[in-house]
Amino acid sequence: MGLVVQKYGGSSVADAEGIKRVAKRIVEAKKNGNQVVVVVSAMGDTTDELIELAEQVSPMPAGREFDMLLTAGERISMALLAMAIKNLGHEAQSFTGSQAGVITDSVHNKARIIDVTPGRIRTALDEGNIAIVAGFQGVSQDSKDITTLGRGGSDTTAVALAAALDAEVCEIYTDVDGVFTADPRVVKKARKIDWISFEDMLELAASGSKVLLHRCVEYARRYNIPIHVRSSFSGLQGTWVSNEPQGDQNVEQAIISGVAHDTSEAKVTVVGVPDKPGEAASIFRAIADAEINIDMVVQNVSAAATGLTDISFTLPKTEGRKAIDALEKAKSVIGFESLRYDDQIGKISLVGAGMKTNPGVTAAFFEALSDAQVNIELISTSEIRISVVTRADDVPEAVRAVHTAFGLDSDSDEAVVYGGTGR
Amino acid sequence: MGLVVQKYGGSSVADAEGIKRVAKRIVEAKKNGNQVVVVVSAMGDTTDELIELAEQVSPMPAGREFDMLLTAGERISMALLAMAIKNLGHEAQSFTGSQAGVITDSVHNKARIIDVTPGRIRTALDEGNIAIVAGFQGVSQDSKDITTLGRGGSDTTAVALAAALDAEVCEIYTDVDGVFTADPRVVKKARKIDWISFEDMLELAASGSKVLLHRCVEYARRYNIPIHVRSSFSGLQGTWVSNEPQGDQNVEQAIISGVAHDTSEAKVTVVGVPDKPGEAASIFRAIADAEINIDMVVQNVSAAATGLTDISFTLPKTEGRKAIDALEKAKSVIGFESLRYDDQIGKISLVGAGMKTNPGVTAAFFEALSDAQVNIELISTSEIRISVVTRADDVPEAVRAVHTAFGLDSDSDEAVVYGGTGR
């Protein structure tokens, strides 16, 4: 008998009907002879409604109390889901993050899981129960306070539990059919990927793909837990994310896994930086001290006449204000001329382990962008990814152009050229 | 420095405005030099909404999951309240029933508190925090599952915490000004009682007064915790419930504390019971085995000709179906002729420790009912209470007549005759 961890997002349990539909799917897995652990998010807009309430009573809600508040959401959905399952004649018990043994650090609102001790879950399973666990939440090791894991935290809960329970698979149920070669809202011909490696999935997640969060994939890779991303509505096979493709999965290694894009970043340019050692360091020290994570960094070639150079970097738009403030404060120490802030940028990334051994990929990527008349502002690469920054307005057209050029379109004959068929 | 436990009901924290108003009141108590522990119920209709959701997914929600669901309500209100207090510049921490050390038995939906170990609350107070505790909930000693205390459970949480923390007073904030000599919706001239003994309050609660529940008063009496029932809206002095009136409270011992009424009961009459030893016992054994609590019991004088008698008893309407089923099932064993069920009854009770030493009270009570043309169907008395059952339609008029007759009306000159001034 196998052990399966299933995770259902808020859109899958948005109302009583959704909860009953999910309950049937869970019971199905149980009937197929599995031990089943279910991780569930808060119903639909519950979390947003709770956040709104918090804002009504306090402009700056304290972390500890904010976490206490938000965790009410999963408490509701998990209890209802357990009831719905019992109503189908199967035994189910719900557990809070704390009861399920999800131990975290003490950083409220974005705690990290440091251990999972699922003793009560194991007992519940051994007694024949389906175990329902609140996603997104845990309990801090030091203070025993309730914590939340931040955005997408329920996926991480599911993978962490799957690892601790040595599950066969962690199924992430969502409102799309799986991971696609590009965002289907932008690229109509985007194809569902049947299998993708942890590495490629990590790069896609880091490049703007929203289906799985980076942290969740990282966790799954570390403990080698296969993830199956699939729709809670259609019940079709979705996308497997793992080290190696499994038996019935398409084993053809494609060069390119997909094209991701991201319009949530902004670009900061520090103008007129003296071109001498230590200048870049002092800029990024100021940013790091403000606890801001940056993405791409580019330093222009210095203009010989002035001895000054420009340094550009990208960061989440939400951190823009903080970054500008931090740099302005350090202006006299760093000694730059001025700052430019641009939030009308977009990033397009091509991801695929195959590009390591296919030197033509980079050239083909730039040709595709050039043919689509898209101007490139910044470039950044890793072994298995190329990213460029363009105008935000150019992003949809650029993504479609690249998707087509690399034969990723679902009915394109060129698919063979750069591999990637049947994914 | 004193320690005060305050309890706020759902109507006091129904929305963000209510929560902010309550937060100000709490901070006021803290500023007055007290250590403050606050017990809070779920916001307004939250509990009803959660129950409705449960009914949508399952016609018979399981106890364990139902409790898990309902406790989300207080989690929301307590976190918001703590945020609102912090927003006023004071430190506050919220605690679930489990975190506050409220240990209960394992009877879901109506658990009983068996111990309170408020170590974390004590620590929070010692560190200068205001402690906010979820009412209505605890954790079972055996299974460590979340439990709820049933209707009015937040009051019991407050009194139990007050006892465990040796508080000076347990303030119960509600949407009325205190305990009245009768329900002000029925008797316009009802008077707020300044002080009432635990004993009289227990009888009033048992007789239909809704302001405080019997269980809560019983707990307070056992641990000798003075209760102050007052309005969260007006801030006026309310009603003190204690062993002895305190310094500035009116110490005049009134004969009558108040008139309570109850239209939530029904009457079952077992017709044609053989008048021999053991018959009544077998009837009430059948009722007890069905876990039904009954209230009044009356056996008619046997008709000599037939050797048969009738036995009537009252019980909550909600238990009526169950009682009839239990009796029908035992009919052949008990050997009665038929059953009559009547849910159009009402109960009027006169409560006051003074009636022990004032023989005229019973007579005056019946005279008042007679003058008001109210027919009496059943009578039951204790040392400090007389209750009668009448037609439900007669209840309002009967309550007003008795209230006036005993000089309880707020501007009545007869108040002096039977005592009770200034309460």
Image (spheres, coloured by chain):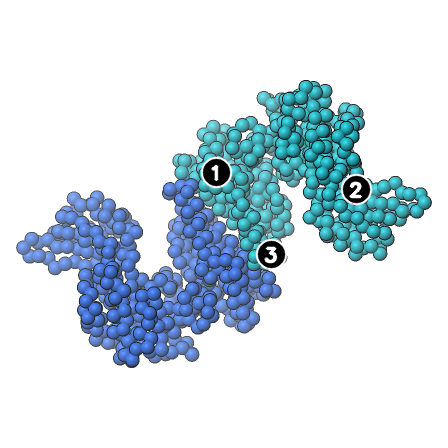
Chain colours: A cyan, B blue
Which residue corresponds to the image point at 52% horizontal and 29% vertical from the top-left?
Answer: A235
Q: Is residue B312 visible?
A: yes
Viewed as shown, does residue B420 lie left or right of A339? Answer: left
Mark 1 Cα-neighbour bin, 10 Å: few <14, some 14–19, many ≥20: many
- Residue marked by disc 3: A61
Front-lying residue, A394 or A71: A394
Front-lying residue, A310 or A411: A411
Q: In this view, does B262 lie above or below A415?
A: below
Most extreme residue toward the right is: A305
Label at residue A297: 2
Which residue corresponds to the image point at 50% horizontal and 29% vertical from the top-left?
Answer: A1
Mark 2 Cα-neighbour bin, 10 Å: few <14, some 14–19, many ≥20: some
- Determine the chain carrying the residue at label 3: A
Mark 3 Cα-neighbour bin, 10 Å: few <14, some 14–19, many ≥20: many
Cα–Cα span, label 3 and label 2: 34 Å
- Of the numbered discs 3 and 1, the one sitting upstream in the chain is 1
Q: SS of the residue at dot 3?
A: loop
Viewed as shown, does residue B60 lie left or right of A251? Answer: left
Indicate the amino acid at tag 2.
Answer: Val
Front-lying residue, A411 or A159: A411
